[in-house]
Image (cartoon, helix red, strand yellow):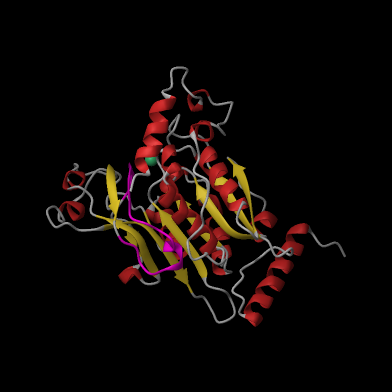
Amino acid sequence: MTVQPSTKARMLLRTAMLVSALSFAGAAAAGSSGTKEVVFIAGAPSHGFMAHDYLAGSKLLADRINAVPGFSATVYYDEWPAREKLDDASAIILYTDGADAHPALPHKSELAELSRSGVGIGMLHFAVEVPKQKGAAEWTQMIGGYFETYYSVNPFWRAEFRSFPAHPVAKGLKPFQLTDEWYYHMRFRDRLQGVQPVLSAVPPDETRLGNDGPYTGNPDVRAAVGKNQPEHVFWVSETHNDATSPAGRGFGCTGGHSHQIWAQDQFRKLVLNAIVWIAHGEVPPQGIESRRPDVDELLGNRDPGVQDEQVPPNFNRQGLADEIAKMNEP
Ligand SMILES: [Zn+2]
Protein backbone atom coordinates (compact mmCIF):
# COMPACT_ATOMS: atom_id res chain seq x y z
CA MET A 1 0.00 0.00 0.00
CA THR A 2 1.32 3.40 -0.94
CA VAL A 3 0.78 6.21 1.48
CA GLN A 4 0.56 9.52 -0.34
CA PRO A 5 2.53 12.31 1.34
CA SER A 6 -0.58 14.29 2.09
CA THR A 7 -2.24 11.31 3.77
CA LYS A 8 0.91 10.64 5.74
CA ALA A 9 1.09 14.26 6.81
CA ARG A 10 -2.51 14.14 7.96
CA MET A 11 -1.78 10.98 9.96
CA LEU A 12 1.18 12.71 11.56
CA LEU A 13 -1.04 15.68 12.29
CA ARG A 14 -3.61 13.48 14.00
CA THR A 15 -0.88 11.77 16.00
CA ALA A 16 0.53 15.12 17.06
CA MET A 17 -2.92 16.35 18.06
CA LEU A 18 -3.63 13.18 20.03
CA VAL A 19 -0.35 13.51 21.91
CA SER A 20 -1.18 17.13 22.55
CA ALA A 21 -4.65 16.34 23.82
CA LEU A 22 -3.38 13.55 26.06
CA SER A 23 -0.53 15.52 27.55
CA PHE A 24 -2.31 18.87 27.62
CA ALA A 25 0.92 20.22 26.21
CA GLY A 26 -1.10 22.64 24.15
CA ALA A 27 1.08 22.11 21.11
CA ALA A 28 -1.00 22.20 17.95
CA ALA A 29 0.26 20.33 14.95
CA ALA A 30 3.93 20.73 15.81
CA GLY A 31 6.15 19.11 13.20
CA SER A 32 7.51 15.67 13.99
CA SER A 33 10.85 17.29 14.92
CA GLY A 34 9.14 19.31 17.62
CA THR A 35 9.80 22.52 15.74
CA LYS A 36 6.80 24.74 15.18
CA GLU A 37 6.44 25.66 11.53
CA VAL A 38 5.09 29.06 10.57
CA VAL A 39 3.91 29.41 6.98
CA PHE A 40 3.73 32.93 5.56
CA ILE A 41 1.60 33.42 2.48
CA ALA A 42 2.73 36.66 0.84
CA GLY A 43 0.40 37.99 -1.83
CA ALA A 44 1.31 39.32 -5.26
CA PRO A 45 2.43 42.98 -5.53
CA SER A 46 -0.43 45.36 -4.99
CA HIS A 47 0.31 49.03 -4.37
CA GLY A 48 3.88 49.64 -5.59
CA PHE A 49 7.01 50.60 -3.67
CA MET A 50 6.76 50.67 0.17
CA ALA A 51 3.03 49.93 0.32
CA HIS A 52 1.48 46.48 0.68
CA ASP A 53 5.00 45.08 0.41
CA TYR A 54 3.73 41.62 1.26
CA LEU A 55 6.85 39.76 0.14
CA ALA A 56 9.37 42.03 1.88
CA GLY A 57 7.22 42.25 5.03
CA SER A 58 6.72 38.50 5.22
CA LYS A 59 10.45 37.86 4.73
CA LEU A 60 11.27 40.31 7.48
CA LEU A 61 8.85 38.68 9.92
CA ALA A 62 9.93 35.16 8.89
CA ASP A 63 13.56 36.10 9.57
CA ARG A 64 12.64 37.21 13.09
CA ILE A 65 10.52 34.09 13.71
CA ASN A 66 13.46 31.92 12.63
CA ALA A 67 15.42 33.50 15.49
CA VAL A 68 12.85 32.29 18.04
CA PRO A 69 13.96 28.99 19.64
CA GLY A 70 11.81 26.09 18.50
CA PHE A 71 10.32 27.97 15.53
CA SER A 72 10.92 27.77 11.81
CA ALA A 73 9.32 29.93 9.11
CA THR A 74 8.80 29.58 5.38
CA VAL A 75 7.51 32.25 2.98
CA TYR A 76 5.34 31.35 0.00
CA TYR A 77 5.04 34.19 -2.49
CA ASP A 78 2.07 34.50 -4.81
CA GLU A 79 1.38 30.78 -4.55
CA TRP A 80 -0.80 28.64 -2.34
CA PRO A 81 1.25 26.06 -0.40
CA ALA A 82 0.64 22.35 -0.93
CA ARG A 83 -1.71 20.83 1.63
CA GLU A 84 1.03 18.82 3.35
CA LYS A 85 2.93 22.05 4.05
CA LEU A 86 -0.15 23.49 5.72
CA ASP A 87 -0.80 20.26 7.63
CA ASP A 88 2.68 20.59 9.15
CA ALA A 89 2.14 24.22 10.12
CA SER A 90 1.46 25.46 13.64
CA ALA A 91 0.53 28.89 12.28
CA ILE A 92 -0.38 30.32 8.89
CA ILE A 93 0.05 34.07 8.32
CA LEU A 94 -1.67 35.76 5.40
CA TYR A 95 -0.28 39.10 4.19
CA THR A 96 -2.14 39.49 0.93
CA ASP A 97 -4.74 41.47 -0.94
CA GLY A 98 -8.29 40.98 0.23
CA ALA A 99 -11.83 41.53 -1.07
CA ASP A 100 -12.82 39.57 -4.19
CA ALA A 101 -9.16 38.98 -5.09
CA HIS A 102 -8.31 37.42 -1.72
CA PRO A 103 -6.07 34.44 -2.57
CA ALA A 104 -7.46 32.52 0.42
CA LEU A 105 -11.05 32.57 -0.87
CA PRO A 106 -10.70 29.41 -3.00
CA HIS A 107 -9.07 27.73 0.03
CA LYS A 108 -11.36 29.00 2.78
CA SER A 109 -12.76 25.57 3.70
CA GLU A 110 -9.26 24.11 3.96
CA LEU A 111 -8.12 27.02 6.15
CA ALA A 112 -11.20 26.82 8.36
CA GLU A 113 -10.63 23.09 8.85
CA LEU A 114 -6.99 23.72 9.80
CA SER A 115 -8.14 26.38 12.26
CA ARG A 116 -10.60 23.92 13.81
CA SER A 117 -7.74 21.43 14.28
CA GLY A 118 -5.75 24.01 16.24
CA VAL A 119 -3.57 25.62 13.57
CA GLY A 120 -3.22 29.35 14.26
CA ILE A 121 -4.39 31.76 11.55
CA GLY A 122 -3.08 35.34 11.39
CA MET A 123 -4.20 38.00 8.92
CA LEU A 124 -2.36 41.23 8.23
CA HIS A 125 -3.86 44.41 6.75
CA PHE A 126 -5.83 43.91 3.50
CA ALA A 127 -6.06 40.18 4.23
CA VAL A 128 -8.65 40.94 6.96
CA GLU A 129 -11.08 42.10 4.26
CA VAL A 130 -13.33 39.49 2.74
CA PRO A 131 -16.65 39.88 0.89
CA LYS A 132 -19.44 39.30 3.39
CA GLN A 133 -21.28 36.74 1.30
CA LYS A 134 -18.13 34.83 0.42
CA GLY A 135 -16.14 34.55 3.62
CA ALA A 136 -17.65 36.30 6.64
CA ALA A 137 -18.44 33.01 8.37
CA GLU A 138 -14.98 31.53 7.87
CA TRP A 139 -13.06 34.73 8.74
CA THR A 140 -15.16 35.22 11.87
CA GLN A 141 -14.50 31.64 12.91
CA MET A 142 -10.76 31.78 12.19
CA ILE A 143 -9.79 35.25 13.42
CA GLY A 144 -12.86 36.61 15.21
CA GLY A 145 -13.75 39.39 12.78
CA TYR A 146 -13.14 40.97 9.40
CA PHE A 147 -13.33 44.18 7.38
CA GLU A 148 -16.89 44.49 6.11
CA THR A 149 -17.45 46.95 3.28
CA TYR A 150 -20.04 49.68 3.98
CA TYR A 151 -19.47 49.04 7.72
CA SER A 152 -15.69 49.28 8.23
CA VAL A 153 -13.50 52.18 7.05
CA ASN A 154 -9.88 52.49 5.92
CA PRO A 155 -8.42 55.94 6.75
CA PHE A 156 -4.78 56.81 7.47
CA TRP A 157 -4.25 58.18 10.95
CA ARG A 158 -1.79 58.35 13.77
CA ALA A 159 -2.88 55.89 16.43
CA GLU A 160 -1.76 56.28 20.03
CA PHE A 161 -1.72 53.00 21.91
CA ARG A 162 -1.48 53.84 25.60
CA SER A 163 -2.38 50.61 27.38
CA PHE A 164 -2.70 46.93 26.66
CA PRO A 165 -4.72 44.05 28.09
CA ALA A 166 -3.27 41.39 30.38
CA HIS A 167 -2.75 38.81 27.65
CA PRO A 168 0.33 36.82 26.54
CA VAL A 169 0.52 38.65 23.18
CA ALA A 170 0.87 41.99 25.02
CA LYS A 171 3.88 40.87 27.05
CA GLY A 172 6.67 43.44 27.08
CA LEU A 173 4.73 46.09 25.15
CA LYS A 174 5.33 49.75 25.94
CA PRO A 175 3.00 52.55 24.80
CA PHE A 176 3.65 53.66 21.22
CA GLN A 177 2.29 55.76 18.37
CA LEU A 178 2.21 54.76 14.76
CA THR A 179 0.73 56.26 11.60
CA ASP A 180 -0.69 53.82 9.09
CA GLU A 181 -3.84 52.91 7.22
CA TRP A 182 -5.49 51.54 10.35
CA TYR A 183 -8.82 50.18 9.22
CA TYR A 184 -11.39 50.29 11.98
CA HIS A 185 -14.99 49.52 12.92
CA MET A 186 -14.41 45.88 12.08
CA ARG A 187 -17.25 43.40 12.09
CA PHE A 188 -16.53 41.21 15.12
CA ARG A 189 -18.27 38.20 16.61
CA ASP A 190 -21.36 39.03 18.65
CA ARG A 191 -20.40 40.49 22.04
CA LEU A 192 -16.74 39.91 21.11
CA GLN A 193 -17.14 36.31 22.17
CA GLY A 194 -13.66 34.74 22.34
CA VAL A 195 -12.14 37.95 20.95
CA GLN A 196 -9.59 40.00 22.90
CA PRO A 197 -8.84 43.47 21.51
CA VAL A 198 -5.12 44.21 21.92
CA LEU A 199 -4.54 47.53 20.13
CA SER A 200 -7.28 50.10 20.60
CA ALA A 201 -7.09 53.83 19.98
CA VAL A 202 -9.37 56.80 19.41
CA PRO A 203 -9.33 57.80 15.73
CA PRO A 204 -9.45 61.55 14.95
CA ASP A 205 -13.01 62.66 14.28
CA GLU A 206 -12.17 63.74 10.74
CA THR A 207 -11.60 60.07 9.85
CA ARG A 208 -15.26 59.43 10.71
CA LEU A 209 -16.60 62.04 8.32
CA GLY A 210 -16.01 60.39 4.96
CA ASN A 211 -18.83 60.15 2.45
CA ASP A 212 -20.86 56.97 2.38
CA GLY A 213 -19.13 54.21 0.47
CA PRO A 214 -17.65 50.73 0.76
CA TYR A 215 -14.48 52.07 2.45
CA THR A 216 -14.89 55.77 3.16
CA GLY A 217 -17.74 56.21 5.61
CA ASN A 218 -21.18 55.21 6.84
CA PRO A 219 -23.76 56.39 9.38
CA ASP A 220 -22.54 53.94 12.05
CA VAL A 221 -19.02 55.32 11.95
CA ARG A 222 -20.24 58.95 11.90
CA ALA A 223 -22.50 58.32 14.91
CA ALA A 224 -19.39 58.23 17.14
CA VAL A 225 -18.14 61.71 16.15
CA GLY A 226 -17.26 63.67 19.28
CA LYS A 227 -17.47 60.64 21.56
CA ASN A 228 -13.75 59.74 21.89
CA GLN A 229 -14.70 56.19 21.08
CA PRO A 230 -11.78 53.75 20.90
CA GLU A 231 -11.63 51.40 17.94
CA HIS A 232 -9.92 48.00 17.90
CA VAL A 233 -7.27 47.59 15.22
CA PHE A 234 -5.51 44.48 16.49
CA TRP A 235 -7.16 41.56 18.22
CA VAL A 236 -6.71 37.89 19.00
CA SER A 237 -9.35 35.20 19.04
CA GLU A 238 -9.74 31.77 20.50
CA THR A 239 -12.28 29.10 19.63
CA HIS A 240 -12.75 25.91 21.58
CA ASN A 241 -14.19 23.29 19.27
CA ASP A 242 -14.28 20.16 21.40
CA ALA A 243 -12.56 18.63 24.40
CA THR A 244 -9.82 16.87 22.45
CA SER A 245 -8.70 19.53 19.98
CA PRO A 246 -6.50 22.43 20.98
CA ALA A 247 -8.26 25.76 20.67
CA GLY A 248 -8.15 27.41 17.27
CA ARG A 249 -6.34 30.69 17.77
CA GLY A 250 -6.20 33.64 15.43
CA PHE A 251 -5.30 37.28 15.14
CA GLY A 252 -6.27 40.18 12.93
CA CYS A 253 -4.19 43.30 12.39
CA THR A 254 -5.66 46.12 10.34
CA GLY A 255 -2.34 48.00 9.97
CA GLY A 256 0.43 46.91 7.65
CA HIS A 257 -0.01 49.25 4.70
CA SER A 258 3.29 51.15 4.91
CA HIS A 259 6.34 48.92 4.83
CA GLN A 260 8.38 51.07 7.22
CA ILE A 261 6.05 50.32 10.14
CA TRP A 262 7.88 46.99 10.55
CA ALA A 263 10.71 49.12 11.96
CA GLN A 264 8.53 50.19 14.93
CA ASP A 265 9.82 47.98 17.73
CA GLN A 266 6.59 47.69 19.76
CA PHE A 267 4.41 46.94 16.75
CA ARG A 268 6.83 44.32 15.47
CA LYS A 269 7.01 42.76 18.93
CA LEU A 270 3.24 42.48 19.13
CA VAL A 271 2.97 40.77 15.74
CA LEU A 272 5.76 38.33 16.63
CA ASN A 273 4.19 37.64 20.05
CA ALA A 274 0.88 36.98 18.34
CA ILE A 275 2.42 34.58 15.82
CA VAL A 276 4.03 32.59 18.63
CA TRP A 277 0.82 32.61 20.67
CA ILE A 278 -1.48 31.43 17.88
CA ALA A 279 1.04 28.60 17.27
CA HIS A 280 0.46 27.60 20.93
CA GLY A 281 4.00 28.66 21.81
CA GLU A 282 5.17 30.40 24.96
CA VAL A 283 5.65 34.17 24.76
CA PRO A 284 8.59 35.14 27.03
CA PRO A 285 7.98 37.67 29.84
CA GLN A 286 9.49 40.58 27.88
CA GLY A 287 7.88 39.52 24.60
CA ILE A 288 9.77 38.56 21.45
CA GLU A 289 12.71 40.92 21.14
CA SER A 290 13.98 41.27 17.59
CA ARG A 291 16.45 43.28 15.59
CA ARG A 292 15.07 46.55 14.22
CA PRO A 293 15.37 46.55 10.41
CA ASP A 294 17.66 49.21 8.96
CA VAL A 295 17.18 51.13 5.71
CA ASP A 296 18.95 48.45 3.66
CA GLU A 297 16.69 45.71 4.93
CA LEU A 298 13.53 47.75 4.41
CA LEU A 299 14.57 48.46 0.84
CA GLY A 300 15.51 44.84 0.20
CA ASN A 301 13.63 41.60 -0.46
CA ARG A 302 11.61 43.04 -3.36
CA ASP A 303 10.43 41.09 -6.37
CA PRO A 304 13.04 41.97 -9.02
CA GLY A 305 10.50 41.28 -11.76
CA VAL A 306 8.09 44.05 -10.78
CA GLN A 307 9.09 47.53 -11.91
CA ASP A 308 7.07 49.62 -9.49
CA GLU A 309 8.35 47.66 -6.48
CA GLN A 310 11.92 48.84 -7.11
CA VAL A 311 13.70 51.52 -5.10
CA PRO A 312 13.41 54.85 -7.00
CA PRO A 313 16.82 56.19 -8.11
CA ASN A 314 16.51 59.41 -6.09
CA PHE A 315 15.13 57.74 -2.97
CA ASN A 316 15.76 59.69 0.24
CA ARG A 317 17.49 57.09 2.40
CA GLN A 318 18.28 59.56 5.16
CA GLY A 319 14.62 60.54 5.29
CA LEU A 320 13.67 56.91 5.90
CA ALA A 321 16.38 56.51 8.55
CA ASP A 322 15.04 59.63 10.31
CA GLU A 323 11.48 58.30 10.12
CA ILE A 324 12.55 54.99 11.67
CA ALA A 325 14.25 56.81 14.54
CA LYS A 326 11.27 59.11 15.08
CA MET A 327 8.64 56.36 15.12
CA ASN A 328 10.61 54.65 17.90
CA GLU A 329 10.82 57.71 20.15
CA PRO A 330 8.95 57.03 23.38
ZN1 LIG B 1 -3.38 49.45 2.51
Left or right of 189 in this view: 171: right
Left or right of 23 in this view: 33: right
The residue shown at (49%, 75%) is 240
Residue 311 vs residue 243, the one in the foreground: 311
Q: Residue furthest right?
A: 1
Left or right of 326 in this view: 65: right
Where, by quadrant of the figure, is residue 327 drawn? top left
Q: Is residue 130 visible?
A: no
Left or right of 247 in this view: 28: right
Q: Is residue 38 visible?
A: yes
| Region of the chain picked out in magenta, as a range | 163-183
Vertical arrangement, residue 328 with respect to residue 9, above or below: above
Vertical arrangement, residue 62 with respect to residue 284, above or below: above
Is 176 covered by the magenta stretch? yes
Is 259 covered by the magenta stretch? no
Residue 121 vs residue 310, the one in the foreground: 310
Residue 5 vs residue 255, the one in the foreground: 255
Ligand 1, image quadrant it occupies: top left
The residue shown at (53%, 53%) is 93
Count of numbered circles on the image: 0
Residue 70 position, x and y percent, is: 65, 61
Residue 246 position, x and y percent, is: 57, 74
Residue 171 position, x and y percent, is: 44, 63
The quadrant in which the N terminus is found is bottom right
The residue shown at (82%, 62%) is 3
Residue 116 position, x and y percent, is: 55, 68
Vertical arrangement, residue 312 with respect to residue 3, above or below: above
Q: Residue furthest left?
A: 226
